[in-house]
Image (cartoon, rainbow, N blue to C red):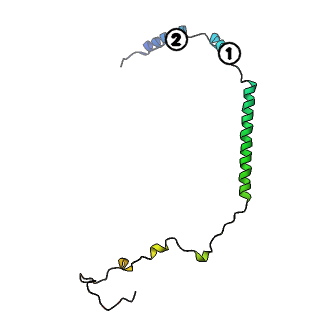
Amino acid sequence: MNDMSDDELRTRFGALRNQDRRHEPQFRPVWHRAELRARAAAPPSVTTLRWIAVAACIVLAAGVVISRTRDARNNQPIVTTAPAISRWQSPTAGLLQPPSRDLLAPPPLLSSVFDGVTQTGLQSTAD
């Protein structure tokens, strides 16, 4: 980085400012050109505005028709036949009754490898 004094920086920036002033365009000619371009731009024709108005009317009319048909549909009574609450059954009730209770039964407290090999005449009171 160059160490320049404040005076040297001021003179360099002054030289750049003077160069910019020599090359900048005059304000009046630029302003007049912009005014001429703005006047030359043709305003939208009357027929274009009419078509835009017609399209807006069609969109609004369609919105009103759709709104009224929805209101008419909402005013009709809704008739549904619901089953009585006394006949209701849980959708997962079938999952709570397994096909084989032996699979889900807890193991006996004192088990042996010979359990289930021989059948005894005793039957559990839970069955």
* Position of residue 76 measured from the top left corner of the image (x, y, whole percent): 73, 60
Q: Residue at x 41, y 77 (%)?
A: 99
Q: Is residue 2 left or right of residue 74?
A: left
Q: Residue 126: name its quadrant.
A: bottom left
The numbered mark at residue 20 is 2
Closer to us: 106 or 89: 89
Which residue shows up at 74% across the image and 47% down it? Answer: 65
* Image point (36%, 77%), residue name: 103
Observer-nearest of 63 and 40:
63
* Quadrant housing the C terminus: bottom left
- Please report the residue visible at 50 percent of the width from the left and 9 percent of the height from the top: 19
Question: Where's residue 44, x and y in %?
Answer: 71, 24
Q: Is residue 42 above or below residue 25?
A: below
Indicate which disc residue 101 carries.
Answer: none
| Three-letter code for the amino acid on which mark 1 is drawn | Glu
In the visual, does 55 lie left or right of 4?
Answer: right
Depicted 14 relative to depicted 91: above or below: above
**SS for dot 2:** helix
Q: Quadrant of residue 59?
A: top right
Q: Which residue is mark 1?
A: 35
* Left or right, 118 with reference to 31: left
